[in-house]
Image (cartoon, helix red, strand yellow):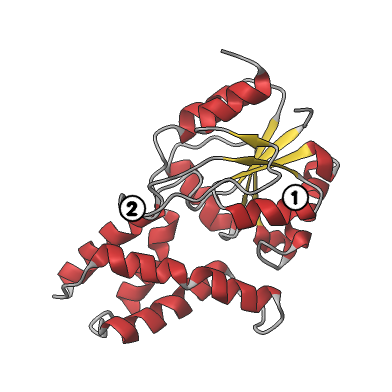
Amino acid sequence: MDVDAVAFDVFGTLTDWRSGVAAELARVGARTGLQADWPAVADAWRRRYRPILDRVVGGGMPWQPLDELHRLMLDDLVTEYGLDALGDAEREELVRAWHRLRAWPDAAPGLELLHGSPLVTATLSNGGLGAVTRLTKQAGLRFDCILSAELARSYKPDPQVYLMAARLLGVEPRRLLMAACHPDDLEAAAAAGLRTAFIPRPLEWGPDSTAAAAPAGVDLVADDVPALARALTRTK
């Protein structure tokens, strides 16, 4: 595949948000005397993600940083699950849990393989620029460039986010590869003119979930990030 740069989704594709957020919920909940099915609470928080971003992209809500949207989602979650013992300080701490996610084991080694190639690597996340910078640093994920939808004042799947990434990286859209585990992200990237690579993450929603299938028309399917790097650099 003849591309000059690879942009990676972060939440889910490179990091295990479910385990990390569930653990933070359990820790903060225990401190405040709460008990709950914390993985289920983490899932419910994440399920609010796409609907609220769609409202922003569709013009139904003004643009706000993702941390602020995560706080709105969490406030709604607290009411639904009867977690009102979580005060402002605890809720802000939980929002920052999304800054401290652990990487999937293959993510850092695969990025190191790409770092040794001519390809430019970047994030392209809905997370805020500062949050993604801190997240990737603490997770040991090395990139040439940190990009965020925040720079376009929008969110994926708005085509302007993908075109912004190509413009800032100085490449034509067709020479930028979007790598993600979410079919809707890749479908939107392809519609904006980018090339696409699907990396399955069958454990994203836990061991009992059904893995997402690669979207039709994807340019490349790789089992993990090292496999993607080998496919792009023709190394073994």
The outermost residue toward the top is 236
**Of the numbered discs in the image, which one, if any, rests on residue 206?**
2
Q: Judging from the image, what secondary structure is the residue with disc 2 in? A: loop
Residue 231 vs 60, above or below: the answer is above
Q: Which residue is mark 1?
A: 190
Q: Judging from the image, what secondary structure is the residue with disc 1 in? A: helix
**Kind of residue sitting beneath label 2:** Gly
Mark 1 or mark 2: name the one nearer the start of the chain. 1
The outermost residue toward the right is 172
Residue 179: percent from left, percent from top: 62, 42
Give the Cα separation between the discs numbered 1 and 2: 28 Å
Instruction: Please indicate whether residue 80 sits to the left or right of residue 219 in the image.
Output: left
Look at the image and tell me in which quarter the C terminus lies.
Answer: top right
Instruction: Please indicate whether residue 122 sits to the left or right of residue 176 in the image.
Output: left
Look at the image and tell me in which quarter the N terminus lies.
Answer: top right
Query: Is residue 148 or residue 190 the one in the foreground?
Result: 190
Residue 231: percent from left, percent from top: 63, 24
Residue 125 is at least partly visible in this image: no
Residue 119: image quadrant is: top right
Q: Residues within 10 Å of mark 1 (few under 14, many from 20)?
A: many
Q: Residue at x 20, y 72 (%)?
A: 36
Q: Residues within 10 Å of mark 2 (few under 14, many from 20)?
A: some
Residue 109: percent from left, percent from top: 47, 27
